Structure formats: structure tokens, C-alpha cells
Amino acid sequence: MNINYIFYVFLFSCITNTGYAQFRASEATNWDRYPAEVQKPGFGLHKNQRVQMDDSSELEEVLLFASDNGHYPYFDLFKCYYVIIGYYSKEVKYISEVTLSDQRELLLEDRNNDGKFELYRRYMKDGKFSVDKNGNNLKTEWRFDRVEYKNNEK
């Protein structure tokens, strides 16, 4: 084996893996899967998950839309809102208000073991916060709540 041959094979494998990663990262999102009214201007889909949230046989798709709201040395802030739609019917069941948080988290759990998942979220009360002069030491009042359905009602 020639050292040049090994070098060119290695170089080729590096280039093709990089090109494949570039191609996979740039796939377009198909917005035909979601009703047009669920996306607000300036927000992008960050995460989605299908779970059972009510008594119907249809699964619900929970969508997390997020937008950057500021970068600080030790944390970032995000504007977020959640949408719950029927996976097959595409019926919009819930759209939350826009909240401010330091996390973009989609936390769906069945904590009461009833077979229906709940959406848990954490956000800043009234979107108000303070930091010191260096942009550190985030101070705010956190709100914790959950979205759950009982008897097909939110």
C-alpha cells in the first residue's frame, strides 16, 4: 500500500462525511403537516412530540416554538409558546401564550399514571427579570404549571 493511497482514501472519507452532514442538516421542514395559524411571526419550530393527552384514540402532537430573546455570559433567554394539535385531524386544541424562559424544554410526562400525558413548563412571571451590571446573576420569579386534559376538556 502506498502512503499516498491511504492519504487520499482518508481525505475522501472525511469530505464525503462532511458533505453528508451538511446535506442532512439542511433538509427543509414541511409546514404542510401543521395548520398555518399555529406559527407566529419570528418563531421557529424547536421540538415536537406525539403523546396521548386525552380520552380520544387520536394522538396529540405537542409543538414547541421558540425565538431567541437575549444572550448573557452564563445563560440565554428564549420566548416560547406551545401548541397542541390532533395528529391526524390537525385540529388545534391549544395554543399557549408566549412566555419567557431560560430553557427550550418540551417536558411531557404521565406523573399520575392515568395513561394521559401532561405538559409541564417553567417560565418567568410576566416576563420580568433582572441581571447585574455584567449580565450575570439572573433574578426572577419563576412560574411552574401544567397543561392537562380531563374528559376531553383542557
Image (spheres, rainbow, N blue to C red):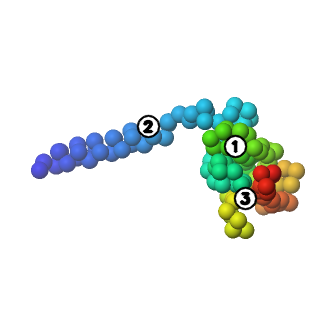
- Counting residues from the start of the chain, the first of labels 3 and 1 encountered is 1
Would you name the residue on which mark 3 appears?
Answer: 118
Identify the residue at image location x=39%, y=39%. 19
Would you name the residue on which mark 1 appears?
Answer: 85
Identify the residue at image location x=86%, y=55%. 125
As displayed, is residue 122 above or below residue 19? below
As displayed, is residue 74 above or below residue 45? below
Would you name the residue on which mark 2 appears?
Answer: 23
Q: Amino acid at mark 1?
A: Ile
Dot 2: element: helix
Is residue 87 in view from this perspective?
yes
Q: Position of residue 18 (x, y in %)?
A: 39, 42
Dot 1: element: strand
As displayed, is residue 80 above or below residue 140? above
Q: Position of residue 90 (x, y in %)?
A: 67, 38
Q: Nearer the viewer, mark 2 or mark 3?
A: 3
Identify the residue at image location x=66%, y=39%. 89
Q: Nearer the viewer, mark 2 or mark 1?
A: 1
Dot 3: element: strand
